[in-house]
Image (tube, grey):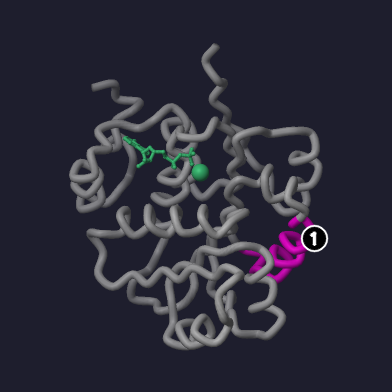
Amino acid sequence: MNAKTAFSSLPLDPAQLSNLESLEYHEMTPIQAKALPLILERKDVIAQAKTGSGKTAAFGLGILHNLNPKLFAIQAMVLCPTRELADQVAKSLRQLARHLDNIKIITLCGGTPMGPQIGSLEHGAHIIVGTPGRLHDHLYRETLDLRRLNTLVLDEADRMIDMGFYDEVINIVQQCPERRQTLLFSATYTEDVRKQSSAFLRNPVEVKVEAQH
Ligand code: ADP
Ligand code: MG
């Protein structure tokens, strides 16, 4: 196998390597091969590649690599534009965390009552996946404690901006600890995304996989 696309070329836990085999992830996709080495070095990364190119596992493996399962506090948060995408991301993260015991991932999206979400947050969680509006509500009510957050992911950043979530995203980012890794994923990377995101990434490295024509 090409050494550059083998998951085993990355400093991943051997249990994670077996898990990836069991998921039939036999080698990295092009965006994973470009982004994962940087993500695992804890760099801020802006990654652009078309839909279906495996961006979720790129940030998911980064989050899990840095997660302390014994620390029952929110260590990573993923912002998604819609509830459907948040559910998909949470499902993928659960698959990628199968070799770890007791990793709690909570999705926080609008359209469902706050009460049960607050209840499950009180029991603690390692990872939050949610949409900007609802995450903003929880922060406003102080039901979401981000003091131990070390990884923030903006997934489908172009869509979040298109859908008008920019102010909420900025407000959420401002409430995250300054010492953190920020990862931004997008299918397109327009001047608009670049301008709007420069404020919350620190010396980001840009990686890109061009669409094949
Ligand atoms: P994107 O976020 O770029 O649109 P996804 O992360 O949703 O793409 O991945 C698309 C599909 O590819 C998913 O079904 C996922 O399980 C699969 N996938 C991701 N990485 C790999 C890999 N390295 N090998 C095989 N399948 C993969
Ligand atoms: Mg995606």
Q: Position of residue 48 (x, y in %)?
A: 59, 34
The answer to whether residue 181 shows anywhere in this view is no
Image point 55% across, 31% down: which residue? Answer: 49
Image point 55% across, 20% down: which residue? Answer: 211
Relative to 121, 197 lies left or right: right
Q: Quadrant location of the N terminus?
A: top left
Q: Secondary structure at mark 1?
A: helix
Q: Is residue 160 above or below residue 133?
A: above
The residue where tag 1 is placed is 167
The answer to whether residue 69 shows anywhere in this view is yes
Relative to 16, 111 lies left or right: right
Q: Quadrant location of the C terminus?
A: top right
Residue lying farthest to the top in this orientation: 213
Q: Quadrant of residue 95?
A: bottom left
Image point 44% across, 43% down: which residue? Answer: 58
Q: Position of residue 20 (x, y in %)?
A: 25, 44
Q: Quadrant of residue 112?
A: bottom right
Of residues 166 and 88, the one drawn nearer to the viewer in this rendering: 88
Q: Position of residue 73 (x, y in %)?
A: 46, 77
Magenta segment: does it hold 207?
A: no
Write down the region rendered in magenta: 165-179
Relative to 36, 195 lies left or right: right
